[in-house]
Amino acid sequence: MKAAAQGGVLVVTRHPQPGRSLARSALDTALATAAFEQPVNLLFLGAGVLQLLPEQDSSDVGVRNLRKVIDSMPLYDMEHCYVDAEGAARAGLTATDLPPGAILVDHTALRALFDSHRHVLGF
Amino acid sequence: MLHTLNCSPGHPAVQDCIALLQQEDALLLLGDGVYIALENSQGWQALQASGATLHALEADARAAGVQHRLAPCFTLVDDAGFVALSELHAQHMAWY
Amino acid sequence: MTLHYCLLVLAAPASGHTSLTAARFAAALLARGHTLSRVFFLDNGTSNGLATAITPQDERSPQQAWSALADANGTELVLCVSSAVKRGLLDSAEAQRHGFPAATVHPGFTLGGLGLLVEAMQSADRVVTFGAPA
């Protein structure tokens, strides 16, 4: 087994918002972990990167605007989030679309990110 | 890392999982995921190529009727076997 | 070696049998000598604690599978309060507050905040998540 589980929780969010509430639950879990001052990182993986589309207007569907919540993460001391670079490219997301503090991770770095956390939560 | 894969063949979670899977990992198929291990299907070759050890949950394989039709690279594990896999691997990632 | 586990259940009983798999996993880890002080149910997983869900006679009830575990081992079954109330899962306090006549949460379960998940993860050697496709 490869070593290096240093600590902290990696919340992996893989489902886009509209159809399911999982994206919101992943975000709430990450924010709650940060609020209790525990080390936590959030990774948008695969179709999960679609949560980052910048022009979200959910007023007509009657749910909270997820991108606004994501943009508020620095208020909870989550300065950075990780974004699957391949998934972002597939979705046509460019650097200017991403929230401030987003770090694009390529395939190799992705695995290292998983390995550097004590616990992983797959949403 | 222990991975569990709980979705039908062709679901995007399969590709996401394969991209992360490495030789030192274990993969356990759950729920509809057991169909991925069907010997005559096309889904498991990429899993095998990762070099990870491959398993299917016995209860789910039997429920689906695939228990005697699995590709030979898969071993069936019972609930205790599932726990044993989680003992060996400090992290678990659920793909679904 | 005894390991301390924390389980996170995101799968609803209505979408397949993943939540029953989770309950069997919990029983199996206890049988192997490990410990499990809390199971946290979040998102659709909170439906596992719905008292008014009627399971057909030839199927296994997830409410019973989980509460048997709690009775035998003292494992806490916590439903995320915000996910739960959104889905109509109210304990007696929430029912009273919102003007409903009775609780809809099975007595084996309690409502609690995400802080209880954070706390359980902090002390756990293993965190295992159970989710299901939509």
Image (cartoon, helix red, strand yellow):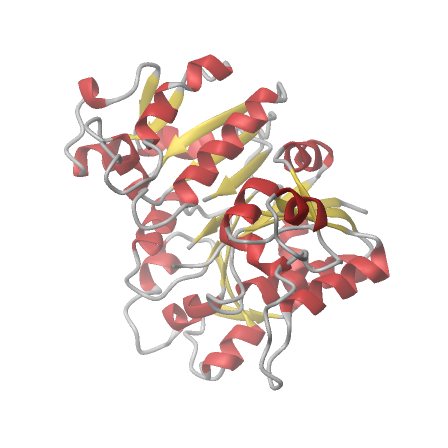
The residue depicted at 19 percent of the width and 28 percent of the height is A55
Q: Position of residue C88 (x, y in %)?
A: 54, 54
The residue depicted at 57 percent of the width and 62 percent of the height is C19
Q: Position of residue C67 (x, y in %)?
A: 75, 62
Name the quadrant containing residue A68. Answer: top left
Residue C69 visible within the image: yes
Number of numbered discs: 0
Name the quadrant containing residue A1. Answer: top right
In the rendered image, the quadrant that contains the C terminus of chain C is bottom left
Horizontal placement of A20 versus A6: left or right?
left
Horizontal placement of A23 versus B1: left or right?
left
- The answer to whether B63 is drawn above or below residue B94 in the figure is below
The residue depicted at 23 percent of the width and 39 percent of the height is A60
Q: Position of residue A71 (x, y in %)?
A: 35, 20
Residue C42 visible within the image: no
Horizontal placement of A35 versus A12: left or right?
right
- The answer to whether A69 is drawn above or below residue B2 in the figure is above
In the image, C123 versus C91, the foreground residue is C91
In the image, A19 versus B13, the foreground residue is A19
The residue depicted at 35 percent of the width and 45 percent of the height is A15
- The answer to whether C123 is drawn above or below residue A71 in the figure is below
Horizontal placement of A113 versus C1: left or right?
left
Q: Residue furthest left?
A: A92
In the image, A36 versus B6, the foreground residue is A36
Q: Position of residue C29 (x, y in %)?
A: 74, 57
